[in-house]
Amino acid sequence: MKLPKINDLNLSSKKVLLRVNYDVLLKKDSIWQVADGSRIDESLPTINFLLEKATKVILLSHLGRPDGKVNPDLSLKPIGDYLSAKLGKQILLADGFDNLNKGSLVMLENLRFWPQEEANDQSFAQNLANFGDVFINDAFACAHRCHASVVGLPKFLPSAIGFDFQKEMEVLVRVKNEAQRPLVIILGGGKKDKLAKLEKLSDWADNVLIGGKLPEFLNVSVDEKKVKIAILNSDKQDITLESIGLFESIIKQAKTIIWTGPMGIYEKPESSLATQRLANAIVESKAFSLVGGGDTEAALSQLNLIEKINYISSGGTAMLEFLADGSLPAIEAILKREVNG
């Protein structure tokens, strides 16, 4: 897969549209502030590179699910403040397209304030593209979304991936093609779209362990030799001790472990046991560990185990879809641009 990279493009005197993933956790004291800036920090190498090369950088991101309406609680302003402090450079927050013409470093307000973003409206993508000469996608976590800022913009502008997206690809391609076995995939959390690629993932993996709320959504037959489905406690807040023990025994034999989604409501002590025990089993094993998704990362952070994981991907669902299919809509959009010019 020959995917164009940021340093393959001539950026001199160019205006660059940069898709980033700033869907981060906020906290509110007197004002909204960034609670965890790790996703923002991951974009800094790409932004600094562009600031050195290009004439103008326009940052594009979404935050939360405002459902196509302006929601002040989901404004990107606190993210702009955080990023300005990190860069030592003021960022202009543009609440509409008209203001994108101002300044050398601009951030458009939450893309999802416009319903056309999630609808992949081509006129919306074209209007965005009019403000740039080049498009860079550095938002791997959004790469499975068929949204205007992800798959629409490459139709109108020369496109490439940023440094963080490139790092994600290097790790995932290596895991997909060269993973040591036994290979175990652990699926948890409450997003049932993780099950969309279950058949392909179970064909590829040696074992798939399913917990969290996902057993409630599972309505297809599975290969019971490979796919192990946790039993939930009576309150549905965690999985049973028997299921924990079964999962631990499989994890101990693994050489590669891929995990996205906690096993229970890890924020509550009474329903965090399975997530805690499985996380410990993973870091105590000698397996290569690949973790994806914000909730899983937050659980590991709560347990002070982040540093013991080999690689943390910014996107749980995007990670799974790439491992299942070997590509993603964002990747295909850029590759198609390369072919068609």
Image (tube, rainbow, N blue to C red):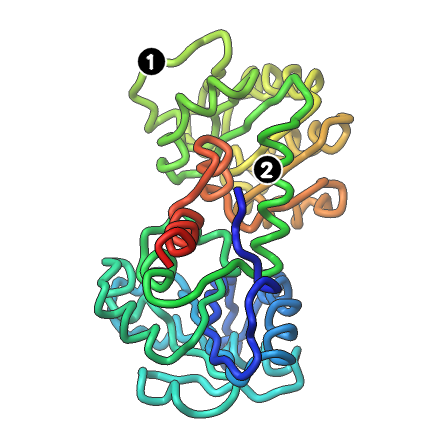
In the figure, is residue 59 to the left or right of 131? right
Say whether disc 2 or disc 1 marks the residue closer to the N-terminus.
2
Residue at the (60%, 57%) spot, across then down: 164
Which residue is denoted by mark 2 in the rendering? 173
- Is the residue 55 above or below the residue 239 in the image? below
Label 2: which secondary element: helix
Residue at the (43%, 65%) spot, across then down: 158
Q: Position of residue 11 (x, y in %)?
A: 55, 75
Q: Residue furthest bottom?
A: 102
Q: Within 10 Å of the Cα at label 2, are there few (<14), some (14-19), or many (20+) other Cα atoms?
A: some
Which residue is denoted by mark 1 in the rendering? 221
Q: Identify the amino acid type marked 1.
A: Ser
Residue 245 found in image quarter: top right
Q: Residue furthest top?
A: 225
Judge whether residue 266 can be spotted in this image: yes
Q: Position of residue 209 (x, y in %)?
A: 52, 22
